[in-house]
Image: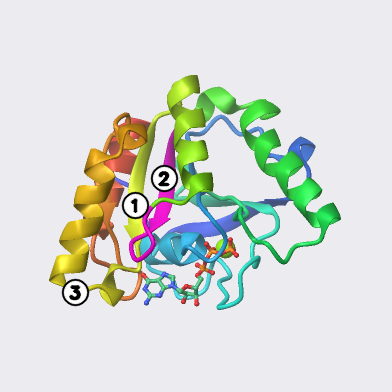
Amino acid sequence: MKINVNNASLKTTAGRPDQFPRDARPQVAFSGRSNVGKSSLINSLLRRKSLARTSASPGKTITVNFYDVDGKLFLVDLPGYGFAKRSPEDKKRWSSLTDGFFTKNPNIDLLKLVVQLVDSRIGPTKDDLDMLAFMGEYGIPHVIVATKSDKLNATGKKNIIEQLEKEPLCAKAEGIVLYSAASHTGRDEVWGLIASACGL
Ligand code: GTP
Ligand code: MG
């Protein structure tokens, strides 16, 4: 089935797990630390400049946002973790919301893929590795996208891929892709992984 990626819109902004949509469509979630580039990646995939709101200051996305793509699947923008400047109340809200996405989601069987973002200049953080361990343990299918690759030279690009490939917690990933939301490098590869995970 062909997906018209130009036909996308924000369907639901959920501040609580009970607001997650109940539509029986495959979901692909984007996970990663604050500021790693989740919303920018979604915009790049959907060929839109600012459908998902981005920001140079971390903590922009504070709700779980569901983007309907051509009536066939949802891309799900999760709030970023590891943002130190958040208040304790906000951190609590964040963890109940994001944990809720995995543990209180009535449609968890529709979650076909998690795209785990890692900053290509930093490599996987402790939180990134915790997330990868969690997905490995619970059998959640996932791929790894190394973001902001336009900021690296050829050696840097080679190094981050090698680092991820030899990290044991990355072993269950169904793909590792170097991405740039600036030049859209990696876009076809990520769409290929999404389509195959969703059976589209
Ligand atoms: P939260 O919503 O806070 O969790 O952040 P996020 O992961 O959604 O990050 P966002 O997409 O808002 O991007 C954060 C910053 O990184 C913005 O200033 C983006 O322009 C920049 N950025 C994201 N992706 C890329 C990329 O591929 N290349 C470059 N050069 N900058 C990027
Ligand atoms: Mg965001």
Label 1 element class:
strand
Callout 1 crowding tier (Cα within 10 Å): few <14, some 14–19, many ≥20: many
Please give the label number shown on residue 115: 2
Report if residue 193 is visible in the image: yes
Q: Earlier in the sequence, mark 1 or mark 3?
A: 1
Label 2 element class:
strand
Q: Position of residue 29 (x, y in %)?
A: 50, 43
Q: Which secondary structure is most common in the magenta stretch? A: strand
Q: Amino acid at mark 3?
A: Asn
Please give the label number shown on residue 145: 1
Q: Which residues are magenta?
A: 112-123
Q: Amino acid at mark 1?
A: Val
Spatial CA span between label 3 and label 2:
24 Å
**Residue at mark 3:** 153
Q: Position of residue 1 (x, y in %)?
A: 28, 38
Callout 3 crowding tier (Cα within 10 Å): few <14, some 14–19, many ≥20: few
Q: Please say which color scheme the image uses.
A: rainbow
Residue 120: quarter of image = bottom left
Disc 2 to disc 1: CB gap under 8 Å = yes
Q: Earlier in the sequence, mark 3 or mark 2?
A: 2
Q: Earlier in the sequence, mark 2 or mark 1?
A: 2
Relative to residue 130, is residue 63 drawn left or right? right
Q: Position of residue 80 (x, y in %)?
A: 59, 55
Which residue: 45% across, 36% down?
132
Q: Amino acid at mark 2?
A: Val
Residue 103: quarter of image = top right
Instruction: Name the front one of labels 3 and 2.
Output: 3
